[in-house]
Amino acid sequence: MRHIRLALRAAEPAGPGIRLLTLMDPDGWPLPRWRPGAHIDLHLPNGLTRAYSLCGDPAEADRWRIAVKREPGGRGGSAWLHDALAVGGELPASLPRCTFPLAEGARRHLLLAGGIGVTPFLPMAAALAGSGADHHLHLLHRGPPPLPAQLGALGDRITLHDTSGGRPDLGRLLGPSEPGTEAYCCGPPGLIEAFLAAWPAERARVEHFTPPPLPPLPDSRPFTLVLARSGRRLDLPAGAPLLPALHALGAAVESSCEGGICGACRVRWLEGPPIHRDRILRPGERETHLMACVAGCAGPRLVLDL
Amino acid sequence: MSVTPSWIGLVAHLHITARAFLPMRAMEQIELVPGEGILGDRYRIGVEEGFYSAKPEPGRQVTLFEEEALEAIRRDHGIELRPEEHRRNVTTRGVPLTHLVGRRFRLGDCLLEATRLSIPCRHIEEILEKPVFDPMINRSGLNCRVLEGGTVRLGDPIRPA
């Protein structure tokens, strides 16, 4: 497994139920570089893997920052990071993956965050400000906002919308969608759904917190999974998930969200065609890659570059 | 039969890293320990800090890479790969690394024995966000064992033993 080891160097409260963590190499060695919009997976000792957007400054080469909101109804990931991980404690993490990159060439960038979903936008907004790009961040929150100190640094490039009295009309908030304007949304599923209804998909980028539920595969049929490099193969029944089959064949494919949003299990495909059910690959990428955690196969053979 | 050295090269860059996947750090000099590797580097035998799944590899105490391969990758593939990005310890100039498998040679005052060619790792594309895996096949450097240790400095000569 490709892991790097991180040690918690500092932790501070950063808004309601939020713990801001500073993670470093145990000896302070520089960490892999990352781009605004990137996230890491943390592998927790209770067996859970949790993805968090990096919300610090990419120029700080020796430290990563993540903001963890306590989710009382969750499965224990955020609770462990709040209560059990003490300063000096270590945990394995993935390499950073940028699944929510800024659109190069866009003239204007509209960033829409729901609550703690503001985290990827902090470095993205800083990068946009640094390059002089036209941008604005709208943060929808209920009650006290998350990360108040970090939001303060954004000056007049952010508008806070307290939704205690209801969500504002997104169409009005974002304005008309013009070519050259890219809009981004990170937040709970309801917000992303409303965003995608209010903004054209070709100029929209979204980052989910948690995987949306998968619809069943209507036209699935049995197929043979073939690994082109090792030559190994396995016959699978209709609708069988790929990840367990890949692991059974000895392929070292990482996975994290197992719901088609995090990018961990991206694999190149050679023959298919696959049935894509992820929420992360763009149309051009689907011509060569699939997300193994959710993909199926529409043909008799699915050949992967593994 | 005596063999006349047919080449002589030099040390162009030196890099180490404490752990797998972390950025390489440029050094002016490195310390080689016989039978172990480089002080502070991830592959030093006995203190491996590589993959979780990695086994110690006695033949990979020091790794070398040709500066000429960086130029070839730029020329043939249009990819700019910098000396700290190929993730080998010693970037050489004027050394036919692929010819040295099974042979001994001098790196500065140190004596190395080449064990096998390095092979690229897929993870390098992920780290660099550059499609360098295929271009690096068959020119990914050389793995060596340290027979005689010492200090290696930038500009040191590399020559047949």
Image (spheres, coloured by chain):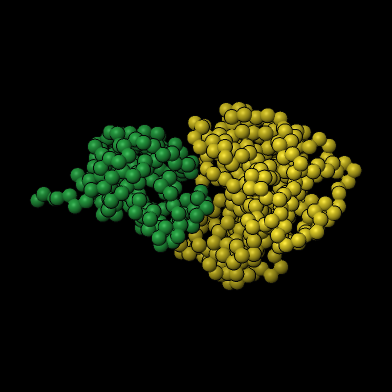
Image vertical order of residue A28 relative to residue B138, above or below? above
Residue A214 shows in the view? no
Q: Which chain is green?
A: B
Image location of residue B161, percent across then percent down: 19, 44
Identify the residue at image location x=50%, y=50%: B128
User: Which residue is nearer to you in this view: A248 or B11?
Assistant: B11
Return the x and y of residue B31 as percentages of the image width and height: 33, 33
Q: Residue at x 77, y 33 (%)?
A: A16
The colour chain A appears in is yellow
Q: Residue at x 83, y 37 (%)?
A: A143
x and y, in percent, of residue A126 in the image: 66, 43
- Against A49, is A222 above or below? below
Residue at 35% x, 51% y is: B67
Task: Note whether A86 is above or below A253 in the view shown.
Answer: above
Of A131 and B147, the residue lying toward us: A131
**Quarter of the image where one finds residue A225:** bottom right
Relative depth, front residue between A177 and B124: A177
Q: Residue furthest left?
A: B1
In this view, the residue farthest toward the bottom is A300
